[in-house]
Amino acid sequence: MKIVTWNINSVRLRAPMIVHMMGLLKPDIICLQETKCQDDLFPSQMFKDAGYTHIHMAGQKAYNGVAILSKFPLQNRMVYKRAELHDARHISAEVKGIVIHNVYVPAGGEIANPDHNPKFAHKLKFMDDLIQFFGLNRAPSILVGDMNIAPLEHDVWSHKQLIDVVSHTPIEVEKMDTLMEQGKFMDAVRHFVPETEKCYSWWSYRNQDWKKSNRGRRLDHIWMTKDIQDRLKSYHIESAARDWEKPSDHVPVMIEIT
């Protein structure tokens, strides 16, 4: 079973791109973030025509939004509210005995100080909510999504220059580590890619030549609870998608499990 996570940065704008990815990578399950549309405007039929007939979503006008597209039935569908807001940022569904959580963590703004930046305070509160929630989780689970945190030194293009920049600060990394520990998760991509190697899933639109500068960050993650990690077979990051016409600034990340 192949599972993809992708911050698509507007599902209506990039629906044809998603269909192209479906044919290219042939995933069984696709988790999208930042869909930026209400549920009644979601282009469901296009995806159903491509074979993804089971869809679970939580939409929001112009902002946020998460969706799970699946070739297999989705059971026990849930929508969660986090950090005292009603943002559409976390949904889950069970597929073949595994609960798949699709999460879009807040970006956190520009200033890495919760006392002076409400967006950063909201991000930290969101992470605290996830820590509490997954600390009580006992189901075999896969957590995917745009976590908006690049935790490791080689998850960013320059650890030294980004150590005080939102997405790579010590307090964010600490909360991510706590979430992984409390939820008994393992990092599926880093299972294959040594921590000493650079690994990215996002390149800013500000980079005129993203490939040449390669100033990326690994913001998109796939984690598995350790009780099912022996089912992990492979991973793939479709970095070429960053060169597709009118691309998202994120690229698809995929794992395959038995």
Image: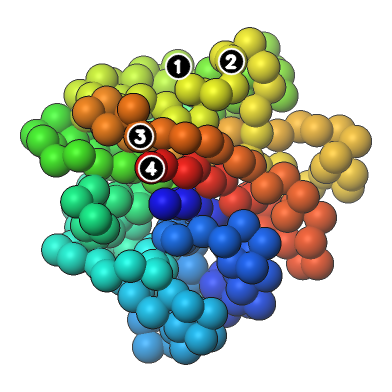
Residue named by callout 1: 170
Picture quadrant where residue 48 is located? bottom left
Quadrant of the frame with the C terminus: top left
Give the mark toward the camera: 1 or 2: 2
Residue type at mark 3 is Arg
**Mark 4 or mark 1, earlier in chain:** 1
**Mark 2 or mark 3, earlier in chain:** 2
Q: Position of residue 192 (x, y in %)?
A: 55, 24
Residue type at mark 1 is Pro
Q: Residues within 10 Å of mark 4 (few under 14, many from 20)?
A: few
* Colouring method of the image: rainbow
Residue named by callout 4: 258
Specify whether 229 is left or right of 167. Answer: left
Give the mark toward the camera: 1 or 3: 3
Q: Name the residue at 68% across, 22% down.
A: 198
Q: Name the residue at 47% across, 35% down.
A: 233
Residue named by callout 3: 231
